[in-house]
């Protein structure tokens, strides 16, 4: 499973799964595959009736957000976000990388009645962005990777808040309060585990995690938020062990399965002029909005950080990260499903826009990263060792 810890292979698996799904969905038997994804698996005793696609996006993807929460806590306590000085530039850049794509989307969709899709182009895919950087930017200073990681983590934090606030349907405060009990039990079990995670405690933690997921899902809040809560409360040393154990399965199975499910879309037989406004808003918002937003906001933050002597970053390194930030993919696909859940045609066009916009961002970022790597001063390259403390 070691191969699935590699950022390069994780990105390749995601891209391959999405490309395969798009191909299969447009073959003669594609409608049968789409029908299978939309078939329901019901658990009447628990009152759960979800399609296979929703079991993947609401269930499996909670594991991915659990790992994201572990990384977020690590960065906030021991990593690149553990002080205001360290967090200033990536935080401001992350905000710019959300505001600009959302503004572009809203400009394209003005008057269409489909403004609810504005969060779709605001996301950055950590696995993909780090994979592209690993392939094309191995000679770049380690601070570039650290900055990208910090920005992507903050971007995910914003995405988590967006999901919790804007995609909650008729929330039940009582059920949400009930979810606090298994989350607290999960925290307690993590404390009892000590330095080692033995089978009985591990099994109990899985059980209470499932209970927490059930209550969060039933409350009307998106179920992935359960994964976030569990990841944030887990004791750091146990969290590192759990992250190391689960990461290969997330990279090699969970994310590719989600990418395959989300990209299983029949390409609409329409002309360019007939494509919906959200398609263009997402297609432009991801590669262009992210590049502009992160670059401009990051440059402003960099100016003030330099005056206080708080960073070694250069403006061209901000541009590198800004180009990588346009790779939305996983979280953008999830946002698309949530925003257009009841509008199948718009949702399908949104999926295509996410895939195309991310593909454009991959090509652009590969060129930008490679160009920056060629211009790297050898002395600058040797200046730092890898500054990212391992999560595991």
Image (tube, helix red, strand yellow):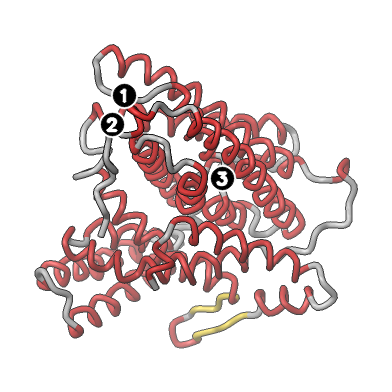
User: Could you say where residue 381 lies in the image, as x and y percent from the top left?
Assistant: 35, 33
Q: Nearer the viewer, mark 2 or mark 1?
A: 2
Q: Nearer the viewer, residue 343 or 59?
A: 59
At x 10% / y 72%, what residue is drawn? 192
- Proximity of marks 2 and 1: CB atoms separated by less than 8 Å: yes
Outermost residue on the front side: it is 378
Label 1: element kind: loop
Label 2: element kind: loop
Label 3: element kind: loop
Residue 63's mark? none
At x 56% / y 45%, what residue is drawn? 327
User: Could you say where residue 198 lies in the image, as x and y percent from the top left?
Assistant: 16, 80
User: Could you say where residue 228 lies in the image, as x and y percent from the top left?
Assistant: 34, 58
The residue that disc 2 covers is: 383
On screen, residue 371 above or below 21: above
Outermost residue on the bottom side: it is 45
Q: Is residue 368 left or right of residue 245?
A: right
- Mark 1 crowd level (few <14, some 14–19, many ≥20, 10 Å Cα): few
Q: Nearer the viewer, residue 109 or 62?
A: 62
The residue that disc 3 covers is: 327
Q: Is residue 305 left or right of residue 168?
A: left
């Amino acid at each position: 499973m070691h191969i699935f810890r590699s950022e390069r292979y994780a990105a390749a698996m995601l891209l391959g799964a999405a490309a395969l799904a798009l191909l299969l969905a447009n073959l003669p038997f594609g409608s049968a595959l789409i029908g299978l994804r939309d078939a329901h698996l019901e658990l009447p005793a628990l009152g759960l009736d979800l399609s296979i696609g929703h079991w993947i996006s609401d269930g499996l993807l909670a594991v991915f957000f659990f790992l994201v929460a572990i990384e977020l806590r690590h960065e906030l306590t021991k990593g690149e976000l553990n002080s205001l000085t360290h967090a200033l530039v990536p935080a401001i850049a992350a905000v710019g990388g959300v505001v600009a794509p959302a503004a572009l989307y809203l400009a394209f969709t003005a008057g269409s009645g489909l403004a609810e899709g504005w969060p779709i182009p605001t996301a950055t895919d950590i696995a993909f962005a780090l994979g592209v950087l690993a392939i094309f930017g191995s000679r770049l200073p380690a601070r570039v990777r650290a900055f990208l990681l910090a920005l992507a983590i903050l971007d995910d934090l914003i995405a988590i808040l967006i999901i919790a606030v804007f995609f909650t349907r008729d929330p039940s405060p009582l059920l949400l309060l009930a979810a606090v009990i298994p989350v607290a039990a999960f925290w307690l079990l993590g404390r009892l585990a000590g330095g080692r995670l033995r089978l009985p405690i591990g099994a109990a933690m899985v059980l209470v995690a499932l209970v927490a997921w059930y209550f969060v899902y039933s409350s009307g809040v998106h179920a992935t938020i359960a994964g976030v809560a569990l990841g944030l409360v887990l004791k750091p040393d146990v969290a590192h062990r759990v992250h190391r154990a689960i990461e290969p399965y997330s990279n090699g199975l969970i994310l590719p399965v989600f990418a395959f499910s989300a990209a299983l879309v029949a390409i609409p037989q329409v002309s360019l002029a007939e494509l919906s406004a959200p398609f263009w808003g997402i297609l432009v918002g991801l590669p262009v909005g992210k590049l502009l937003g992160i670059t401009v906001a990051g440059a402003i933050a960099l100016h003030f950080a330099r005056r206080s002597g708080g960073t070694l970053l250069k403006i061209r390194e901000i541009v590198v990260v800004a180009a990588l930030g346009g790779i939305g993919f996983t979280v953008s696909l999830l946002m698309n499903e949530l925003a257009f859940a009841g509008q199948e045609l718009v949702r399908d066009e949104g999926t295509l826009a996410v895939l195309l916009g991310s593909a454009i961002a991959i090509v652009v970022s590969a060129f930008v990263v490679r160009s920056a790597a060629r211009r790297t001063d050898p002395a600058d390259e040797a200046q730092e060792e890898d500054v990212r403390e391992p999560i595991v």
